[in-house]
Image: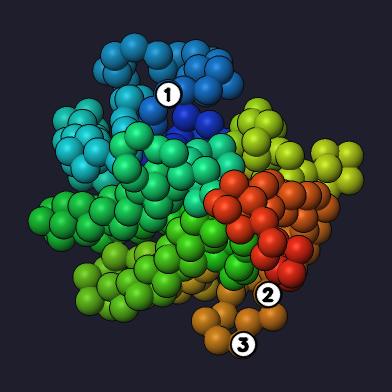
Amino acid sequence: MDQLEEKVAIVTGGGSGINLEFVKLLFGAKCNVLIADIALHPRATEWLSSIQQIGPLSTTSSPQVEFIKTDVTDWAQLEWAFTVAHDKFGTVPDIVVPGAGVYEPSANSFWEDNDSDSRYKVLDINLVHPIKMSRLAIRHMIEAGKKGTIIHVSSIAGQRSSLVTPLYQASKHGINSFIRGMASLDSLAGIRVVGVAPGTVQTPLFTENPKASKFLDMKKDFLLPPEVVAKAMLALLTDAKYKSGTVLEVCDVVKWREVSLLNDPGPQGPASLTSRKADAVKDIMRHLTADGNPGSVPNVRIITD
């Protein structure tokens, strides 16, 4: 991984899960990394402590990892992350990963739209933030005359539809479209835009949130280790066979595939299926009843995937 030595990366959502594992890979490849996240998971704090990176940057030439608390829905804070990266590492980032994300049942949802801020946070975090982060990255890279890579974290939800999690599905469909729309940026400015689309992953997003994990049977369903998805992200970053605009599906430990824009067969692999998502239909029926339409509910044919 010599091509990553002394490079600079910003990773939003790097405080846990898939993005934390990717930060570890970047650090192992001697890349300097700025984690921009709302908080650090205890596993992240433990890892940072193990590499003696908590506190001010050292004066050594070894790769460094820094953390700044960041609300990715605040555009000023996204811009500030680029400022901090430049101040800490002496240059604009070569790699930008707008990886922070939430799952719909663990945030405000389409069916439980009681957010006092009058916003759908799922869309602000999963769709608006990575789009804006990409715009900032492009601007900074071009100003510095630098080529770079932007890696998005999508999902197989971007190939499916669901009455249960419509906002989450919409956010991932949007990211897939955005990735493909940015494909020609490589030939125009030397900036590659790619994305990874995993199936169900064993991350705190699911394992530590009862609202999200209720869709899963932990004894039956296959959950990908986050390290596998991080390896796929590293492949997107370093392997020239993955062209700009690639959406790489990861539903298997070893078998990954590029998702086609047209006539794609759909998600494949053990991590592409969950066994209890249909149970959530009962919740939807309760919401419909509360909306004052109980008579229409029994006649609705509900398709979850």
| Residue drawn at (83%, 42%) of the image | 217
Find residue 183 and report its image quarter.
bottom left
Residue contact between numbered discs 1 and 2, judged by CB atoms under 8 Å: no
| Residue drawn at (31%, 25%) of the image | 68
Q: What is the distance, in whole Å, between disc 3 and disc 2 at their CAs?
A: 9 Å
Find residue 59 and report its image quarter.
top left
| Residue drawn at (17%, 30%) of the image | 87
Point out the residue furthest to the right here: 220
**Residue 133 placed where, x, y %?**
28, 50
Q: Which mark is residue 63?
A: none
Q: Amino acid at mark 1?
A: Ala
Q: What is the distance, in whole Å, between disc 3 and disc 1 at their CAs?
A: 40 Å
Please name whichever residue, 156 or 294, is drawn nearer the observer in this view of the structure: 294
Residue 166 versus residue 85 in the image, above or below: below
Element type at mark 2: loop
| Residue drawn at (58%, 42%) of the image | 105
Query: Which mark sits nearer the N-terminus, 1 or 2?
Result: 1
**Residue under numbered circle 2:** 266
Residue 205 versus residue 259 in the image, above or below: above
**Residue under numbered circle 1:** 39
**Residue 127 placed where, x, y %?**
38, 55
**Residue 154 placed where, x, y %?**
51, 58
Left or right: 200, with 236 as reference point: right
**Residue under numbered circle 3:** 263
Q: Amino acid at mark 2?
A: Gly
